[in-house]
Amino acid sequence: MASFLIWWSPEAKSIDDCLWDRMVAEVMCRPQSKNQAPIRWDLHTRYVRAVAVRTLSCEPDPYRHIAPDIEVFAALRYHLCDRELAGRRFTEPAALARVEDSARRLTLTRDLLGHRHLVWTRVSGGILASTREEPLLIHPEVSPVWNDSHIAAMLAQIPPEDTSTPFQQIFSIAPGMTAEFTPKGMREFRERFEPCEDVAGCTDTQLANRFRDLLQDSVYRAACGANRIGLSISSGLDAASIAAVLMQQHKSPVVPVGVCYGYRTEDGADIDERVLAAQLCQRLGIEFVGIDASSIPLSFTLDGGWNSPIGAVQENPYREIKSEVYRRLADHGADVVLVGHGADQFAMMPANWIWSAWANKRYDWIIEGLRSYLRHRGLWGTLRHPSIRRLVKYLLQGRTGLMRSIAPPELPTCFRDQWMEARTQALSRLSAWPDPSRAAEHFNAFESADYALEVPNAEHYGLDIRSPYRDWNLVRFVLSTPTFLMAGPIGYKWLLKRAAAPFLDSQWINRPKFGDLSPLWKRNYDRRRAQIAERLPRLGRWVDQYFSPNSSFGINSQDGYRLTQLNSFLSWAESPLQRE
């Protein structure tokens, strides 16, 4: 991804040359592509000093002169015309800085879903802005004091304040936000996140067909500019659908390569995903590469290096596994990688499905869903299911019930007030959407940071990571449709299954969710449990309550949420980034 660093002073004050060189060196030390030497652009005028670097051959130039006195620095995925660069609303990944010398104005803008990082800070005489925090921290006036509330939110997996960063003196441009700096001060503009107006009245089939069209368009654009496409493949529906749609459109003589990691059944996995992924690749005509994940060490550090961006402090147990996936893809000549990240978020808020079906008078879905619950849970389990309780709540409270949430029970007490405040603000801001809770899961700083975690890891190997499911048009459409079409016992990813039907056999579409990561969670559990027993014995009993292999919760599925959260807290305590 392109990077840039800007010093802007409305008073025409200069920045020390030695200090600037040190900051530029930090920008230039970013991971570099194996097949593309970094290309650098410099600008030095009365009011601004800037540098931009392009590290990937498939991305547009990060510097553009669009008018006699207007310069643009941007980290983009696709080429934009001058008129688009002069605007404020970006649906494609973009972090943009626009400098207007005659008006003495600096404008910073970020795309709606926050695919590109953009931060700034105020120092004596001007503004520093960059695509990363590290160059700004070199300035002597920018203190590296931690922003405790931001870090606590990220570790607890709560959306933090969208303009905050891990550092008190550095601020983020929020997704869909434009900040305009002039000698008179700063003005902030926010783009409205509004649902599609033409969804109401459509049949289920019409919605599925539209989903298919949007997915095809998203995959097509995600593959644009690639010399060889790589796929992070699996046996699940999400990655398989992307692969199938891609091969329907693929015209290049260069065959895409798919990489899948998995655990052997001898290591405790119920299935070996690589076997199923290999069958899929053979059917679609994709070169297949398998990785034995059991041989990959797990990382528990938050070192702030290229492998763990300093702006994202979550623990990521997949980090080393994904690094190996990207390394293999790069070794096989891929320069653009398509991933299935984001499709699971479409099925968020499963407890809201029955209310959604009730509100849309789709009693046929409710009847089939209740039959499924009764078959698998029995009468008592069905009556206790969260979706039933949620329906009663909404019927009693009406629309106001949608605007309230209860903090997750696994969240430490000290973070619950912060969670509730952030949640209440998000639901109020997104009240126009059919399911504000589901919309809030997509349009927040935590989700954009989670996506951004993929970028530096893949970029280290010269890869551009792209997720068709995180396309703005597709996300906006899905969140405008009723929740029951993507969640619940009958509707789980129903739109995606119907959309993929022309490209995939029914054996793939109707296959139960696999993704068996039992060995990953078990190894994490054993290691962390030993550390807790040594340092925090009382906490060990709490961990056992949730993670015991003999409990009803088990060591799989949503264990990743709670265990990752626990890993994050312990890793942060052990991190060299932590204060003395």
Image: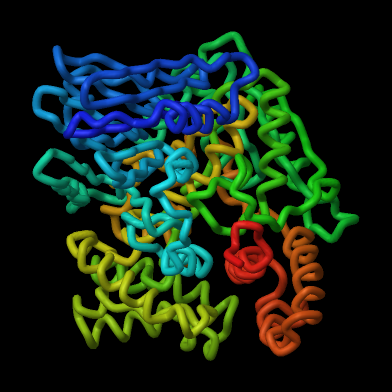
Could you say where residue 353 lies in the image, as x and y percent from the top left? 38, 68
Residue 114, quarter of picture = top left
Residue 452 in sight from this viewpoint: yes
At x 26%, y 53%, the residue is: 480
Work out whether residue 455 or residue 478 is closer to the camera in this orientation and state it. Answer: 455
Q: Colour scheme used in the picture?
A: rainbow
* Residue 488 coordinates in the image, percent (x, y): 45, 66
Q: Quadrant of the C terminus?
A: bottom right
- Give the residue displayed 34% in from the left and 33% down from the top: 94
262 to 468, vertically: above or below: below
- Residue in the image at 73% along x and 53% along y: 299
Taking the view exactly as shown, the residue that stands out farthest to the top is 253
Q: Is residue 123 above or below residue 60?
A: below
**Residue 347 percent coordinates (x, y):** 44, 58
Image height of 99 relative to 456, above or below = above
Determine which quarter of the picture holds residue 270. bottom right
Image height of 266 relative to 116, above or below: below
232 and 188: which one is in front? Answer: 188
Could you say which is closer to the camera, residue 496 or residue 116?
Answer: 116
8 horizontally vs 236: left or right: left
